[in-house]
Image (cartoon, rainbow, N blue to C red):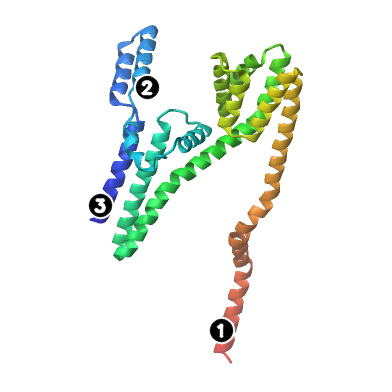
Amino acid sequence: MEWALLGGMVVVAVAMVVYGLLPKDSDRADAVKRRTAGLSADQDLVTLQGKARQRALKPSVMERAAPILSRPVMPKNEAEQSTLKARLASAGYRRESVAAVYLASKTIAAIVLGLTAAFYAMGMGKEFDDIAYYTIAGIAAGFILPELWLRSTIKKRMEKIRNGLPDSLDLMVVAVESGLGLDAALLRVSDEMGSVHAALAEELQIATIETQMGVARSEALTKMAQRTAVQEMKTLVAVITQAEKLGTSIAKALRNQAEALRTKRRQRAEERAQKTAVKLLIPLVLFIFPAIFVVVAGPAVIHLMNTFSSDALNP
């Protein structure tokens, strides 16, 4: 009975998440009607734009429930809230409701894993104290898992931006030397690198849009460096700002920075290659060497055992 209840609760939780992510039936029905009715391209574009505005204004189930579910774990002061939003921005999530959804996921994960651990302990016939320990462990795991996911996402995005900087700087040097301004060069690089280094192109587009809206270029670049949390990006912004203040050649500064970043990228690749031998040592000792020993020495051991057993039977 407990396992049936647990399975039902897990199915309901997964169904709610999937329902919030999938498109609504009305949108699919409208799309089918448009295709069958054979509307013109202009009418179809207007309809799509209207549907997009409606989806943007209408929050999903998770977004509607997030303010209530995130209330138990919501940071009390504004400094912690700003830090959380900055970390989510470093992971690539910038919507206003992202912080509430992230905190709500902690609450949902804690409830689901806590109930799972409790029903597991009950199914194993544990005592009340052990059930309480299992439940607390499940709740703690539910709070920790979203944090681990966020750290992993931030780390992967930082690595993508770090790897894309040398190539983007090379293209930026070509654009600046061909006569484009720095803002136009940033926009051109973001357009060209969008399919290769999407994370870096997105950050460059945001910085360019902020500059077009009246924000100082140095301030927009500084915000970009803070969002990415990549040290190489901070160094690049400092080099560009210093070159503008001193009036030196920005193309030369970008070229030197690109060479330095390319050297660092090669050194990181060499470092990983050197660590490969050490990382392979553990699986070799635990899995491969025992298998080789069994294959090589196994027949000899079996032959010796048969020989000794025959000698013992025939003195």
Give the labeled residue for mark 3.
4
Question: Do callouts 1 and 3 mark residues in contact (Cβ within 8 Å)?
Answer: no
C-alpha span from label 1 to label 3 = 55 Å
Instruction: Determine crowd level at label 1: few under 14, some 14-19, many 20+ residues with C-alpha closer than 10 A.
Output: few
Residue at image point 63% right, 30% down:
164
Helix, strand or loop under label 2: helix
- 23 left or right of 247? left
Dot 2 or dot 1: first in sequence order is 2
Give the labeled residue for mark 1.
309
Residue at image point 68% right, 20% down:
172
Residue 95 showing in the rendered view = yes
Q: Nearer the viewer, residue 285 or 262?
A: 262
- Residue 315: image quadrant is bottom right
- Residue 105: image quadrant is top left
Q: Which amino acid does label 2 sit on?
A: Ala
Q: In this view, does 15 lie above or below 186?
A: below
C-alpha span from label 3 to label 2 = 38 Å
Q: Which mark is residue 56?
A: 2
Helix, strand or loop under label 3: helix
Q: Which amino acid does label 3 sit on?
A: Ala
> Residue 89 appears at what percent x and percent y?
50, 31
